Image (cartoon, helix red, strand yellow):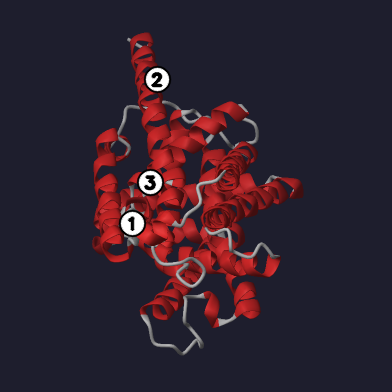
Amino acid sequence: MNDTTNEQEPLDEEGREVLRSIRLSRMIFPVLLGLAAVGYLFYSQFDLERFQSIHWSGTAFLWLGAALLVLFLRHLSYTYRLFVLTRGQFSFRKCLELMVLWEFSSALTPTSKGGPFVMIFVLTQEKLPAGRTAAAVLYAMVCDSGFFVLTLPLLLLVYGPPMLYPGMTGFSDVSLASGTFFITYGMILTYWLLLVFFLILNPKAANTLLQWMAKLPFFKRFSKRLSFWGNEFKLAAMEMRSQKWDYHFKVIVATVGSWTGKFIMINLIIIALVPATPLDGSTQAFIYARLVAMFTMLTFSPTPGGAGLYEIALANFISDQVPQGIGMVVALIWRGMAYYGYLLVGALVVPGWVAARMRERAANKSATT
């Protein structure tokens, strides 16, 4: 297999666009959206009496600490997946840093422009061989979307329509939630099937199709990106087919662990703030299923990292499990940990990473002149 190391070439427009997408000034917009959502939640749901009923006891902080621990373990799961996908090209510590960059870029950009494009650029700058770069990003996309495609039907078989939204009694309920769910699930399923077909079953067809599309006048604006992805599918398929079964097993287990941790974290915050929440497996599993449904509906969020939408959505999706007013607090604590926490950590990591890459480019340029 011809898997050469990516060379550091002068940044093209795509590279400059990626660097612009992760500059710290881009944090302003999602933070403002989050503040707007907080304002709306306070206006529509804040109840002083309910808020005062929250017992900020040692037990509550213990559960919140457990939620933070799960967030950390989730990051470790994603880090381990990247470590496996890159086949040990980087140290585990380096993968920790790269996953911060991945999460930070996802937090600053809508789904269609976020993580995948940025991470291919980042891994290229880290001189990861081309095949491993393509496999790391595309295989991660297959696994992430596959988690929802395969998990949701199983959960629906167990819990039925009530898991989709509070008050739903049948799949025929005409509501924003039910309509959004089935449309979004259909989009995820189509997206996943195309990825599986082009990446695993017939990567040559992907390259041929995308290269053909790149030549059409209608897609002229996206011609470079289409040509790029056609080549990436081919490289990724070559890389993946050369691996043994344990490579795929580890990647899948790490994916399931990271997504499960994302939802369990919210379960723990609910338990912390609502001590009356039953701790039995049935209740907690139902809440978990509801959260999977919520994330499905918000998959294609138009706002950076779902800023503003997730805060409002969570408070509404758990309204039958958490008293009104307290649900707002659950949403704010969760987003503070899992979203704004990554913005903060990313703000510390990204400038150093960009500066290091620029110094490296300058040194390489000096060495060749």
Q: Nearer the viewer's eye, disc 1 or disc 3? A: 3
| Kind of residue indicated by mark 3 | Ala
SS class, disc 3:
helix
> Camera-side residue: 109 or 269?
269
> In this rendering, is residue 312 above or below 358?
below
Residue underneath mark 1: 214
Q: Counting residues from the N terminus, which is met first, the one under dot 1 or under dot 2?
A: 1
Q: Nearer the viewer's eye, disc 1 or disc 2? A: 2
Image marks 1 and 2: residues in contact by CB distance under 8 Å: no
Residue underneath mark 2: 356
Question: Could one spot residue 124 in this view of the protein?
Answer: yes
Q: Position of residue 266 (x, y in %)?
A: 53, 55
Q: Residue at x 53, y 59 (%)?
A: 274
Residue underneath mark 3: 107
Picture quadrant where residue 69 is located: top right
> In this rendering, is residue 307 above or below 192?
above
